[in-house]
Amino acid sequence: MHVFWPEPTVRAGCLYYVLGKLKTLAGKIVFRIAFAGLILVQFVVVVLLLWGLSEIFSGDNYFEVGILAVLLLLSPFLIGANSYFLFQRFTRVQYVLAESERWLGERRKFDVQQIGRRNRIRRWVLWLPALSVLLFCLFLDETWPAVTHLFHPRNGRLGGYQVSIPLDWEVTFSEPDSEGNRERSYVRANHWKGMLKSAADEFSGRTPSLTSSSLGCDSSRSDDNHTYSPLPDRDRLIGTRKYSQTGVELTCNEFISRDPWSAKESRTASCVTANRDFDCLLDGGDERDVSEFYDMMQRVKKSK
């Protein structure tokens, strides 16, 4: 049996072809690694930029904090869009060749109407990130507080008690105690109304219409007294309630509070357990806030 080896020119051609393919593959791998590094650099630059802005606007201006938060949420979409256009720019030749082959293949397999439907669906899918950001900003009063709950997942576990903070309340600070080991644990929340409208008022030079109420719940030793003490010249008692459920007894007092500077009236409500180891305070609220506050108090229970 005779074995016929390829001619030297054929072997050289095959070797050249294989080496060319390996070189192309290595180039694609290096390019994608470098492009991933470029995306990472963009994220680092954006984070440093936002950090610098937060240092410049380091006061307690909630409007500036809101602007920084919106920029932080928009940055992944902006970086993604920029990276997409850069990738298309760098790979234009390969993209045109690949698209032409794909288009010819689709023409052989599908009819023109089906190709049109698929292209329309792709265009709509590309708009989904922008629509998501738009909806997030339009309903900022509801969406932003829900995001803060993700950063404070156990905000309601306070010592031996469990309180449920509504999703439309922004959790600003929390020091939970899931194991019951701390001497004191707390959660602070705000209920904002009209954030987007207030931003529009600020840009148009009008007086911002932003309003808010605050909520604070504490759990501590019974000999620590952190309960609310009404001010005689500001607070007027209008009602008292008592709740008893699953081993938790709460006494709640509700006041009408008058702001000495603007003369505006708001509601203040305070609830405390019988042995004074747990209390909650609502300040600056309206009737809806008070109703939500009492719903929260009725759901307070002992931690397991």
Image: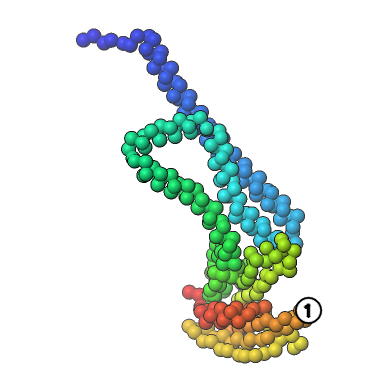
Q: Mark 1 falls on what kind of element?
A: loop
Residue at 59% of width from left, 43% of height from top? Answer: 82
Percent position of residue 113, x then y:
37, 44
- Residue at image mark 1: 261
Displayed quadrant of residue 263: bottom right
Q: What residue type is labelled 1?
A: Trp
Residue at 64% of width from left, 54% of height from top? Answer: 71
Nearest the eye: 297 or 166:
166
Q: Is residue 260 above or below residue 83?
A: below
Percent position of residue 150, x then y:
55, 62
Residue at 39% of width from left, 17% of height from top? Answer: 14
Q: How are the colours assigned in the image?
A: rainbow
Residue positioned most to the left: 1
Residue at 48% of width from left, 83% of height from top? Answer: 246
On screen, residue 86 versus residue 23, left or right, reads right
**Residue 180 visible within the image:** no
